[in-house]
Amino acid sequence: MNNTLFKDRRATGLLNRVREDVSHLRDDIGSLLTHTTRTTLPNGARELADQAKSQLAAGGAYAASRLRNLRSQPPRQSAGWIGGALIVGLLAYGAYALCRDHCQCSRRTNENEFDPEDDIPV
């Protein structure tokens, strides 16, 4: 700094201390970034990978135990479930078809729409 601008000794001393503090702060930030990129991040990645491996192993063991439990249970009546689902689907389709036909018929009679399928005498 140019000491001729500040004739106040205290202001000059404070500015010198701030300049030194900023220099130390810059050095500390550089050290922190270096340490973080070289040590902290790789260690964190290793720990995260280890946790993922252990969780995958635990999930595999859980799935295997569930499969063993399913094998030990008596077989269920899956044909009954499939048949019931088929009947419900057929009933739903029938209701849909009835509603669709009813809506088309009422629209034709109310609006006197021309149906291209009807024969027109020539």
Image (cartoon, rainbow, N blue to C red):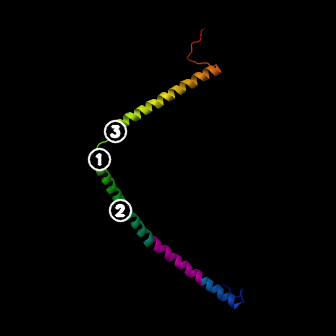
Q: Is residue 25 magenta?
A: yes
Between residue 94 and residue 2, name the one nearer to us.
94
75 or 38: which is nearer to us? 75
Q: Which amino acid is tagged 1?
A: Gln
Report the residue marked by disc 3: 78
Q: Secondary structure at mark 2?
A: helix
Q: CA distance from mark 2 to mark 3?
A: 36 Å
Identify the residue under disc 2: 54
Mark 2 and mark 1 lie on one chain; the one further toward the N terminus is 2
- Secondary structure under tag 1 reads loop
- Which numbered tag is attached to residue 73? 1
Task: Name the amino acid, label 2.
Answer: Ser
- The image quadrant where one finds the N terminus is bottom right
- Give the extent of the magenta segment: 20-37
Q: Position of residue 46 (x, y in %)?
A: 39, 67
Is the residue 67 above or below the residue 22 in the image? above
